[in-house]
Each structure stands twice: as structure tokens, then as C-alpha cells.
Image (spheres, helix red, strand yellow):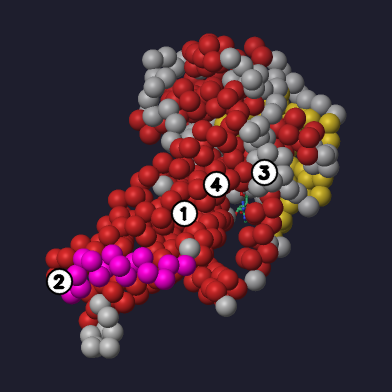
Amino acid sequence: MIEVNNINKSFAGKQVLFDISGRFEKGRTNLIIGSSGTGKSVLLKCIVGLVTPEEGRVYFNERNFLDCDIETKTEIRREIGMLFQGGALFDSMSVEQNVMFPLNILTKMPLDEKQDRVNHCLKRVGLENVNKRMTSEISGGMKKRVGIARAIVNNSRYLFCDEPNSGLDPLTAIKIDNLIQEITTELDITTIVVTHDMNSVLEIGDNIMFMYKGRKAWEGTSEEILDADVEEVREFVYAGKFIHTIRERTS
Amino acid sequence: MKNLGKYFIFLGSMFRNREPFHTYIKNTLDEMITIGVDSIFIVAIISTFMGAVTTVQTAYNLISPWIQDYVVSNVVRDMTMLELSPSIIALVFAGKVGSNIASGLGTMRITEQIDALEVMGINSTSYLVLPKIVASMITFPLLVTLSMFLSIYGGFITAQLTGVISGEDYLYGIRVDFNPFIVTFALIKAVAFAFLVATVSSFRGFYTTGGALEVGQSSTKAVTSSCIAILAADYLLSQLLLT
Ligand SMILES: Nc1ncnc2c1ncn2[C@@H]1O[C@H](COP(=O)(O)OP(=O)(O)OP(=O)(O)O)[C@@H](O)[C@H]1O
Ligand SMILES: [Mg+2]
């Protein structure tokens, strides 16, 4: 479980996050949603420690992440897996080397065990027979899968995904979403997904935090979001013409 | 000035919380190939021509019945060893290796690869930058040594081909009055320059923000700053060690 308390963050005098608090439970997919530029990525980076907020606390299973010594920090970080918005695969390495990388650096596993683990994870995300390809030779959807495989290879307890389905077609996007949800329940880990895709919200939103202009504006589940009584949420949910039309037809 | 402070903090951050030693060995060897071995060709060409040109020009300037022929190669030797080989090759090194380091790290930064390392709990400065520094400091002195040999040899060939001085005079000239300290001095300079190029370029690349355009700018800045650092260090070391 991850808990954040009163996060405030500004860049060069301009405040981007205002007093954000929330709880993200284990074994569930927690979503952070909101329109572009509301600070979702910044919040995620504050949680994993890539950005230091001016104020606030982050707890990983009761362990204070921001004010701990460097050993505890490293220990927590080694339990974190993250899928970046652009994949962030190491482009000097093959698919297999990318996935094996955390094991090479962080563990003393023998090679055949590492190889097994890598093959298992690649298979889990639906990628086989691409082990030796370079990362520049695979498609966007495959990159996301490799990114997920790399994030879970070292038995992570926390999984962070920044827009896992941006730039993908709706079918592939849903597959990636379901993959994330399955992995979350299967491995019983704490997952936080940043997205602005309403499909994902309805598909996998166990617990949703809605952000508006740097503030937390609403919180709830995917069932509740359709009837939310906050104006900004309604605007966000019923933004597209598609949904708008469907809504009018059905009512 | 603010950059200078940031630069020292950057250097310091490399020694906090390092990974186990074995992770660095392979990286360092890889870097030695990209940094060292891949530079041999350009260094060889430049050095040979540098020696040739220096010989011809020195001979042209020293035409006088009072000056014996061997003085030409004597001057060529001291000039290449003291200044031309370490410094000119360092400037070339800054152009080739410095820009390569900065654009490589800059790309890793903007595509969030450095963030990915950090999230895994890896000290990205020491993991990425330390092998580059060590590899530069090992290979660059070797390149300078190669350059000194080839320059003097290039001068020898030119002397033979053009007949500005005789081969015997040339060989006599490069042996007479030899002070071994100039080799030590050249190698000290080489190590210092290699350190500067690697750290300054890494620093420029590491703190790139923005997109592909900024990566290009970082790489240009890396070359400019490295060259300035080399020339300043050159002056400082000459002042300290030769007077
Ligand atoms: N390193 C930074 N320096 C300065 N400002 C930043 C930095 N990172 C983010 N910001 C600012 O913070 C605000 C929130 O950015 P953020 O990337 O979190 O948006 P987002 O909600 O993730 O949007 P998107 O859905 O488009 O990814 C933006 O106004 C952005 O300009
Ligand atoms: Mg974002």
C-alpha cells in the first residue's frame, strides 16, 4: 500500500501540485486521471522520488520514502517497477538484455535462472521470439510490453505506469490495460496508472483519483464516476462526441 | 559560476552509493572501445600530417648558415611532445569523444532512460559516467603516445621525401639533448585533459532538458566548454610544471 500526504510542488515559482493526499491499495489498479498538464506525471514522479516535492510525505507500506536514509531509499526503489510514458527502453540493448538488466545489476542470480525469469516475463506479456531484436526494431505496443516485462522482472511490489496506452490503437490499448490489471491481481502488487483514456477508466479503474489543475477534485470507483456530481469530472467523462451521442441516444 | 558549483556536485554524486565493482568492469571495457579504439584512425591521420607540416615549416624558418640541420628535428621533437600531441589531439578528442558522450547522455535523459535507472535504485551518474571517465583517462594517454610517435615519424618521412634535411640529421636531432621529463609532462597533461573532456561533456549531456534540438545544443556546448577547459588547464600545467 502506498500513502501520500499533502504533496505540494512548484517549478520556478509556479505551483503545479496543491496539497495532494491519497491512498493506493495493494492488489488493485489505482488510476490517476485528468486532462493534459494537470500534473499527473509530476505527481507520479514525486511518488517514485524522481522529483522532490517542497512539502508532503510518501509512505511505502509505512516506510517514509522522502525522509529516509539512502539505504532504505535504495531498498524501496529496488521494489519499484515503472513503465515510462515513452517506454524508456535502453536503446543500446536488445529486448532480452533490457528485461534482464535489473536482474544483472540488482541480483546475484546465475545466468540460466535469469534467462528463465526473462523468458517467463516476456511470455507473460505476450512476447515470444523477439528476444534478440533491438528496441528500435519493435513496434510501439511491443515497446510497452517490454517495458512492463522489465518493470516486473525483479519481483516488484509496486508498479507505476505513465500512460501505458497512449499512442496505441483501441484494441491494443485494451490488451495492455487488461495485462496490467491481471498482473496486479496475480502478483498482488500495488499498481498506480496515470491515464487520460476513458476506456481504461471504465475497464480497470478500481480506485480513481481525478485531478484538476494540480488539485485532487474527486475520488471513487469506475462505477461511481459516471454519476459523479463534480462539474469538472462530468466535463472530462463526457468530453468526446462519441460518448456524448451515446448518452443522448440512451437517455 | 552556478554551473561550476553544479559541476562539482555532479562529480561528488558519482561516489555516493555505488554499485558492486563487477558491474563497472564490462562497461569500462565497452567505453574503452568506443572512446579509445574508435579514435585511433583520426588520431593517426592528424598526427602524421602534424609532424610533416611542422618539419617543413620549421625547416623553412630556420634557413641560415649558422644553424645546423639537426636543430630542425630537435625543434620538431620538443614541439610535438610538449604541446602539439597532447593539446591538439585533446582538442580533437573533445570534438569527437566529447560530442559523442554529451549526445549519448542527452538522448538517454530526454527519453527518460536515466530516470528509468534512477527508479531502479541505480546511481545513474556513477553507472553511466564513471566508466567513461576511467576509459578516457586510460586510453587518451595511449592515444597521445601513439600521436607522438607518428608525428615524429611523419616528420621523418617528409624530411626524406622533400630532402629539407637528411635522414641522419633528423635522427640525430631527435636524440640529442633529450629530457625525459617532457614525456612525463605530456602524459600528465593527457590524463588531465582526458578527465576534463569526459567530465565536462558528461555534465553537459546529463543535464539536458527538452528534446532533440537541445541534445544537439548540449553536444555543441560540451565541445566548446571542453576546449576552453583544455586550454586553461594547458596554461596552468605549463606554468606550474615547466617554470
Ligand atoms: N521539470 C519541469 N520543469 C518545469 N515545469 C514542469 C516540469 N515538469 C512538469 N512541469 C509543468 O508541470 C505541469 C504538469 O505537467 P505534467 O507533465 O504532470 O502534466 P500531465 O498531467 O502528466 O499531462 P499529460 O497528460 O499531457 O502527460 C505542466 O504545466 C508542466 O509545464
Ligand atoms: Mg504526463
Residue A61 in which image quadrant: top right
| Circles 3 and 1 on the same chain | no
Callouts 4 and 3 close, C-beta under 8 Å:
no
Residue B232 visible: no
Q: Is residue A3 above or below residue B143?
A: above
Q: Nearer the viewer, residue A218 or A240?
A: A218
Tell me the quarter of the picture where residue B56 sits. bottom left
Labels 2 and 4 within one chain: yes
Q: Earlier in the sequence, mark 4 or mark 1?
A: 4
Per the image, the residue denoted by label 3 is A50
For the residue pair B232 and A91, the one nearer the viewer reads as B232
| Label 3 chain ID | A
Q: How far across and how far down the image is residue A60, in percent? A: 79, 30
What kind of residue is marked 4? Val
Q: Nearer the viewer, residue B159 or A221?
A: B159
> Which class describes the residues within 10 Å of circle 4: few (<14), some (14-19), or many (20+)?
some
Residue for badge 2: B163
Mark 1, residue position: B141
Height in image: A231 above or below B235?
above
Mark pair 4, 1: CA separation: 12 Å
Label 2: state its secondary structure: loop
**Label 3 Cα crowd, 10 Å radius (few <14 / some 14-19 / many 20+):** some
Mark 4 in CB contact with mark 1 (< 8 angstroms): no
**The magenta stretch spans which residues?**
B163-179
Which quarter of the rendering shows the C terminus of chain B? Answer: bottom right
Residue B89 in the figure: left or right of residue A5: left
Say if mark 2 contacts mark 1, CB within 8 Å: no
Within-10-Å neighbours for mark 1: few <14, some 14–19, many 20+? many
Please state the horizontal and vertical placement of residue B180, each as a whole percent of the image: 48, 63
